[in-house]
Amino acid sequence: MEVHHPHSSHTGKKTFKEYFLEFLMLFLAVTLGFFAENMREENVEHHKEIEYVKSMIEDLRKDTANIQDVVIRFEKLSLVFDTVLKNFDKGTSKFSQSWSNNFVRIVKGGYPDYYYTDRTLQQLKNSGGMRLIRIQRASDAIVDYDDANKDFITEANYLGRIHEQVVDESFRLWSFKLLNQKLNSTEWRKKKVPEGDYWIIKDKTQFENLYNLIEQFSQSILFQKKNLLSLQKQAIDLITLLNKEYHLD
């Protein structure tokens, strides 16, 4: 039996309109996918940005507290310097327990160190994350604060060299060996220098040089204190700026 197949009036050939609609739908799907991916990445990066800013604020708060502690210790140390310098001639000509205590404190005690908290900054630098700080004012202020801390470290290195010179000259002129032999446990706990003549060399020129070094050490301490107060203000201003720009108050 002969089978007859029905003939369709549709030839299977797509019209220009159909091609255009398919292209338009495909274009819209790709475009929407692209925008959706961009929005997802934007949200992820914005979240990272906020987390970095919050972490930076925590570091800055630690810095301001550490600076305050070091400034207070610098102020106490400045009183020690004042005592030694004002009474230098008397202290080097005859034994004075008060003067000797302060002199040994300068030589053996050194000075307080300040290290800024760069945890977040290092993370930003190592991961290339500085680009995430998209608010230019905030980014610039963070970089400026980092630079200010680097300048402080340079000045701190100079302070360290001055201290080394004071120690070297003091060790040449004063017998810490004799001091250790005379100290008993009670006096050591009280940081009390026993009476005695500890000067190995008693030369006016050498004493003059020692005085100059201690005075320079004292001025460097005052300069570092001023730098620290400036850093503290910069840190506080940066906290205020970040809170304002990122609405974290």
Image (cartoon, grey):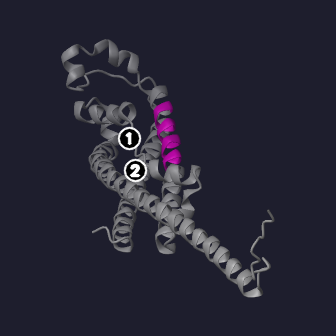
Q: Quadrant of the C terminus?
A: bottom left
Residue 232, percent across and down? 36, 60
Judge whether 137 appears above or below 231 on screen: below
Residue 90 found in image quarter:
top left
Instruction: Tell me where residue 25 appears, x and y as whole percent.
Output: 64, 77
Element assignment for label 1:
loop
Quadrant location, the N terminus: bottom right
- Marks 2/1: CA–CA distance: 8 Å
Amino acid at pointer 2: Ile
Residue drawn at x 23%, y 13% is 184
Q: Which residues fall within the magenta stretch?
A: 155-168
State the SS at label 2.
helix
Q: 76 or 211: nearer the eye? A: 76
- Mark 2 Cα-neighbour bin, 10 Å: few <14, some 14–19, many ≥20: many
Residue 192 picture location, percent across and down? 23, 26
Q: Relative to residue 30, is residue 76 depicted above or below? A: above
Which disc number belongs to residue 221? Answer: 2
Residue placed at 67% from the left, 82% from the top? 21
Tell me the residue at 27%/36% (across/down).
99
Q: Position of residue 219 (x, y in %)?
A: 42, 53
Q: Is residue 133 visible?
A: no
| Callout 2 touching callout 1 (CB < 8 Å) | yes
In the rendered image, is residue 136 in sight? Answer: yes
Task: Pick whichever of labels 2 and 1 is earlier in the sequence.
Answer: 1
- Asked if the stretch drawn in magenta spans residue 172, the answer is no
Residue 19 marker: none
Give the label on residue 111, or none: 1
Question: Depth check: 90 or 163 in front?
Answer: 163
Relative to 105, does residue 133 appear above or below in the rendering?
below
Could you tell whether 184 is left or right of 54 in the image? Answer: left
